[in-house]
Image (tube, rainbow, N blue to C red):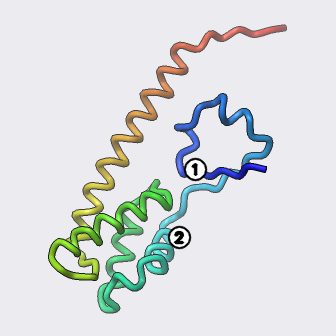
Amino acid sequence: MVIATTDKPETLDPTLMSRFICKVHVGRPNEDSRRKFFGLKFNEFIKEEDREAICNLVASQTPGFVWGDLIRTALISLQLAARRDDNYMTMDAVLESLETTKSAFNETEAVLRDHMQHMVNTMDFKYQN
């Protein structure tokens, strides 16, 4: 038995995907889910007094993000904190990490849209009666 997961199934080879017998789709998290996930997952890296503001900021600024995108955002924030010899995320670090992550997210989405459009444009449509 093989179990596989991905945040971006559209990037997988269709031939590979056809080999799986069962596929379960879990949608992208909504704003409330992103807020809770970020708060729970990175609780120990956010000062208590900043927690609500940071979690609300991340949740509101990340529509379309999946769990991996949120983790990437947090890791970049923590790297920025480490550069200033701190163990906690700050609002400034989170804002900077959101810029970086959203830029990468938008580039990936654009590449996927172009790839999908190319596939549609080059498909040979044949209908059988």
Front residue of 72 and 57: 72
- Pointer 2 or 1: first along the chain: 1
C-alpha gap between disc 2 and disc 1: 18 Å
Front in this rendered view, residue 79 or 40:
79
Nearer the observer, disc 2 or disc 1? 1
Locate residue 107: give its quadrant. top left
Q: Looking at the rendering, in which quadrant would you find the C terminus?
A: top right
Q: What residue is pinned by disc 2?
A: 33
Residue indicated by mark 1: 6
Q: Position of residue 49 (x, y in %)?
A: 30, 91
Q: Residue furthest bottom?
A: 49
Residue 109, image x, y percentages: 41, 41
Residue plotted at (46% across, 54% down): 64
Q: Is residue 127 above or below residue 46?
A: above
Q: Which mark is residue 70?
A: none
Q: Which of the 4 image quadrants contains residue 54?
A: bottom left
At 79% across and 50% down in the image, what residue appears?
Answer: 1
Q: Is residue 29 above or below residue 124?
A: below
User: Please, what is the three-letter code of the amino acid marked with disc 1?
Assistant: Thr
Q: Residue at x 32, y 47 (%)?
A: 104
Which element carries disc 2, helix, strand or loop?
Answer: helix
The amino acid on which the numbered mark 2 sits, given as a three-letter code, is Ser
Front position in the image: 70 or 62: 70
